[in-house]
Image (cartoon, rainbow, N blue to C red):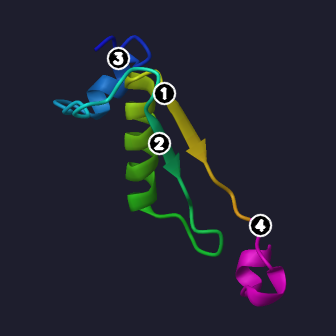
Amino acid sequence: VDISGVTPAMEELVPRMNGLEGALPGLVCTRFPPEPSGYLYIGHAKAILLNNYYARRYHGRLIVRFDDINLSNEKEEFRE
């Protein structure tokens, strides 16, 4: 697999990463759906980095989804 989309810094962050079995270059699509009414935490950071790594490694796409939310149903701290 040509990993020219992966930077040396990314390779250092994810050493010995296995490839995606059966993945075809240009057809890999990953997504990151953050929780719209909650705080991001370290697990979110890991997920976005891994999704970005595989999208770049296979010259695919990374979709970051942002949901519209009904602010009247959310806590005040998330409205700010």
Which is nearer the eye, 23 or 56? 23
Amino acid found under the numbered disc labelled 4: Asp
Q: Which residue is mark 1?
A: 60
Amino acid found under the numbered disc labelled 2: Thr
SS assignment at label 2 = strand
Amino acid found under the numbered disc labelled 1: Gly
SS assignment at label 4 = loop
Q: Which residue is mark 2?
A: 30
47 shown above or below 22? below
Q: Which residue is mark 4?
A: 68
**Residue 68, image quadrant:** bottom right
76 shown above or below 67? below
> CB under 8 Å between callouts 2 and 1?
yes
27 shown above or below 30? above
**Residue 44, image quadrant:** bottom left
Q: Which residues are magenta?
A: 68-80
Label 1 vs label 4, nearer the camera: 1
6 shown above or below 4? below
Q: Which residue is mark 3?
A: 8
Q: Is residue 76 left or right of residue 36?
A: right
Structural crowding at the residue carrying mark 1, measured as other residues with C-alpha within 10 Å and reported as few (<14), some (14–19) or many (≥20): some
Label 3 vs label 4, nearer the camera: 4
Q: Could you tell me how far apart the alpha carbons at marks 4 and 2 are, in whole angstroms?
A: 20 Å
SS assignment at label 3 = helix
